[in-house]
Image (cartoon, grey):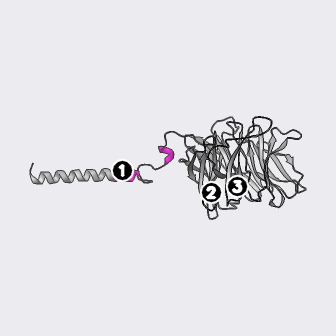
Amino acid sequence: MNSSTVCASIVASLCAALALASLQAMAAKPGGGGTTDPCATTTEFVFPAFTYRQVSGKDQIIYVADASGKCSRTVYKTSNNVGSLGAGAFSYPVRKGTIDVGRVVWPDGNAIWGIDFTVTGSSIQVGPKWKVYEGFLTSLDLSKDGNTLYVGGYDQNDRPAIKAVTIDTASTTFLYVGATGGSFFYTLDAGDTALYADLSLPANTGHELMQFSLPCVGSCSSVIAANAAPVFPTASPTASYAMPIVAYSDYLAGSNNCWQLKYLDVSGGSPVPIFAGVQPRYGTRSSWHGNQVLTNGRNSPDGSGRCADTGMVTQVDPATGAETPLVRGYDPDGR
């Protein structure tokens, strides 16, 4: 082989290598002929598993994600009243005679809006937005089948109340009316057989974790835990669909923004604390996906007793205390 042949061969090899590298680089960029969509590259996932929100300025974006948090799809973006009621509530599948329709509802001013979406693989087709409820509210949640909307607010005499809205028929009934003026329902969470609520007492003097048996007939309420710490959210209870356990956040006395996750076994007549010996974990506005808790993650107390906000939706195993940050965002609602 003469020198010119050697040089030509080297140049050809270099060109081929550069071309291959260029194709690989293009595949790693959106629109480059390949894909960086984690929903397309994930091989094992449960979708949809939970919703969460991200906030930027006045914008709030509600996402639906797989169980790992690696695959997210946008459900709705609003530039209106972001508020403090979180990402609303999520149900999948809703009771519509199908197995592929999900529903998200969220507050916007003195109204609750909803969107249904159809799931195909890891993609969603979002339907039109519609008004589900109008009136002052302090909290909300959806039933497991997505057909009942529970709304915390007040009755005509300014007493704390919970309403049940049947979405299919647009009918509304009072589930509960309290007797203590000046209190309000900070959060609601609908389980299979009971509704759980965090009642904030007057003048921020404490919180009560309340349970309402479903269906509610006559006197169906009871207080299953209480905390006198003058901060909120203190209880924010959430019930698992997979097992008879309620998780809630209990404010750590003397700390700075530390809400410890605690658990109650509600399978018997009286709730019983469980998982007390595992590694303490901290979070707020929790939900469940299967037997795992999803929460707004907070770090363990530092030397000054402060639990910093991680800015991540975090998964916690209540039986072991193991925690896994899933995705940047807040206010997860699982199924």
SS at mark 3 in the image? loop
Q: Which residue is mark 3?
A: 252
Nearer to me, 44 or 229: 229
> CA separation, marks 3 and 2?
10 Å
- Does 326 sit left or right of 114 as displayed? left
Instruction: Tell me whether the residue at label 3 lies in contact with that at label 2, contact meaning CB atoms closer than 8 angstroms.
Output: yes
SS at mark 2 in the image? loop
SS at mark 1 in the image? helix
Amino acid carrying mark 3 in the image: Leu
- Does 147 sit left or right of 317 as displayed? right
Image quarter (top left, top right, bottom left or bottom right) of the C terminus: top right
- Does 30 sit left or right of 141 as displayed? left
Which of discs 2 and 1 lies nearer the camera? The answer is 2
First in residue order: circle 2 vs circle 1: 1
> CA separation, marks 3 and 1?
51 Å
Q: Which residue is mark 1?
A: 24
First in residue order: circle 3 vs circle 2: 3
Is residue 145 visible in the rendered image? The answer is no
The x, y position of residue 198, in whole percent, is 77, 50
Is residue 295 visible in the rendered image? The answer is yes
Amino acid carrying mark 1 in the image: Gln
Nearer to me, 313 or 321: 321
Amino acid carrying mark 2 in the image: Pro
Decide whether residue 40 is among the magenta residues.
Answer: yes
Decide whether residue 85 is among the magenta residues.
Answer: no
Residue 301 is tagged as 2
Residue furthest toward the left? 2
Residues drawn in magenta: 22-41
Within-10-Å neighbours for mark 2: few <14, some 14–19, many 20+: some
